[in-house]
Amino acid sequence: MTESDRSAPARLVSFEGIDGAGKSTLIAGVAEALRTRGVDPLVTREETTGWLGEAVRRSIDERMDPLATLFLFLADRAHHLAALRPELARGRLVLTDRYHDSTRAYQAVTLADRFDDLDGWLKEVSHDWLITPLRTYLVDIDPEVAVGRMADRGSRTNYEKAAFLGKVRSEYLRIVAAEPERFVVLDGTRPTVELVRVITADLETLGALTPSAAVDG
Ligand code: TMP
């Protein structure tokens, strides 16, 4: 990979937040709003819907060693990015429901006793292939509210417990504090339509809604 590949101003936009924050509904609303303006974003997610993503889900469901789960998340992401790279290279706007910051926030909690510096390690193993998002929206919400919202979903994994999600939220806020220029923090209790307006205006300001133009890489 060349240096220009890494520095291409890819229109990669990620959405982050704890489980139950309302990211999926929000992304669907943003995509719909953009389509009415003639922009056709690629909407995607991690873990992916492919077999690597399925492996990630199994490793969580079967409570495998969190270190094994970390490597599966990274494998899934490497594969995901390989698929996204051609779309990004031709200037397509890509909206992803979770990305690298999910690993930084969630695995900081699941692997708290195994890494002194997970962020540093992640940077080391991924800087050659990871694309930094143009913008990341953190949908912030109180973990109790999030868990309340998920009560109907019927999932029983540890990932959905308020205490755990509270720690993940703290990790997200730590990441935002370290990179405030990349993030916009949104109040997840606000109506979706309002958040969609904020996001589309922000994307416009970033120049991400102009017609696709080929970018380096
Ligand atoms: P989801 O399929 O409902 O998004 O659930 C995936 C879970 O995995 C969710 O709790 C977030 C978590 N996760 C990580 O722990 N690390 C990651 O890198 C990603 C993408 C998700």
Image (tube, helix red, strand yellow):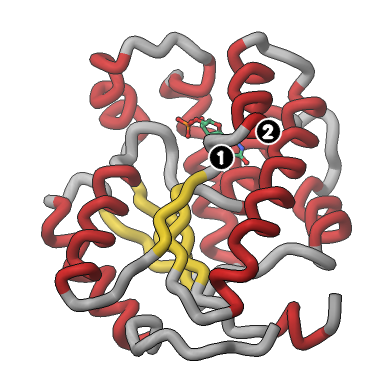
Image position, residue 4 (x, y; %): 76, 87
Q: Relative to 30, say whether 8 is above or below.
A: below
Label 2 environment density (alpha carbons within 10 Å; few <14, some 14–19, many ≥20): some
The span from disc 2 to disc 1 (Cα, nearest Å) is: 7 Å
Label 1 environment density (alpha carbons within 10 Å; few <14, some 14–19, many ≥20): many
Q: State the SS at label 1.
A: loop
* The residue at label 2 has a CB less than 8 Å from ligand 1: no
Residue 30's tag is: none
Q: Relative to 59, say whether 203 is above or below.
A: below
**Residue depicted at 48% across the width and 90% down the height:** 213
What is the tally of numbered marks visible in this picture? Answer: 2
Q: State the SS at label 2.
A: helix
The residue tagged 2 is 52
Give residue 74's quadrant in the image.
top right
Camera sees residue 180: no
The kind of residue tagged 1 is: Thr
Q: Is residue 84 left or right of residue 41?
A: right
Between 4 and 38, the one nearer to me in the picture: 38
- In which quadrant of the rendered image does the C terminus lie? bottom right
The residue tagged 1 is 48
Give residue 209's quadrant in the image.
bottom left
Marks 2,1: beta carbons within 8 A? yes
Q: Is residue 207 left or right of residue 64?
A: left
The kind of residue tagged 2 is: Leu
